[in-house]
Amino acid sequence: MVITGASRGIGRGIADYFLAAGYSVMGCSRGPAGWQHEEYSHAQVDVGDEYQVRDWFRSIKNAKGRIDVLVANAGIPPSATFLALTTGDHLREVLRINLAGAFYACREAAKVMMLQRSGRIITISSITADLHEEGTAVYSASKSAVTEMTKVLARELAPHGITCNVVAPSLVTTAAVQSLGDAVAARFVSRQTFQRPIAVEEVCNAVAFFASAASGSITGQVLHMGLVT
């Protein structure tokens, strides 16, 4: 299993979950992992850098011979900044990490999976894209783009036995979300169908559903967590 953004937050939780389930996990982040496991291999990769991502996936293919599951999780969290106050630099960085980073990871994983004619690609989006919450224009646009990209990829890769699905969590109790502040977090929660934050373990359960060998006929789907759209 390959997970981007695995050093903390949702990515770390997914890594822990699948390591406990007996998977061998390869993860990346821009910095060191800060944790170790005998079945975990970490690389310092900027997912917004096309060539770093390409080289990392090549090293995984050389070391493991195959990639069974990709979880494209790395991303910049919402900043709650109104569009009129959002800088061009912030726009470019969010799109570079959230959209281009997911694109590069999915592209490189797809190359390996097409050769083996099997695989699971799971991207992490957000229900924020469906809430139309003030201050999230750039973040929501990036996550909407990831969702649409995944749906198109699902059609392209279906003939090769590869599924592509999206997990779109509501507010998750991570350090990145807590940095938004209590007032912003409370506003997000009030817009959800289930008006509570969700635990990382709940996201892991959704990822495990799509990653399962028994989910081979499920592709191009978006699992909204905490919201009825």
Image: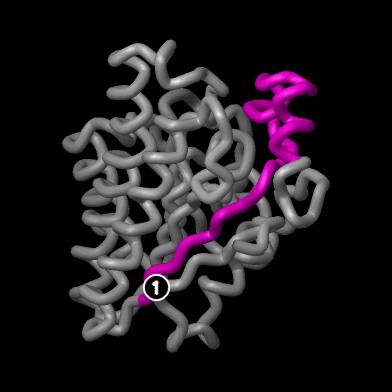
Residue at x 43% of width, y 11% of height: 85
Which residue is nearer to you in this view: 63 or 131? 131
Residue at x 22% of width, y 85% of height: 159
Residue at x 27% of width, y 40% of height: 100
Q: Specify start and end residues of the magenta stretch as a single range.
A: 163-189
Residue 14 relative to residue 153: left or right: right
Instruction: Provide residue 82's location: percent of width, then percent of height.
Output: 49, 19
Mark 1 highlights which residue? 220
Residue 139 relative to residue 119: left or right: right
Q: Secondary structure at mark 1?
A: loop
* Residue 229, above or below 114: above
Residue 165 lies in quadrant: bottom left
Which residue is nearer to you in this view: 165 or 207? 165
Instruction: Provide residue 50's location: percent of width, then percent of height.
Output: 19, 37
Instruction: Provide residue 212's location: percent of width, then percent of height.
Output: 55, 78
Residue at x 34% of width, y 46% of height: 102
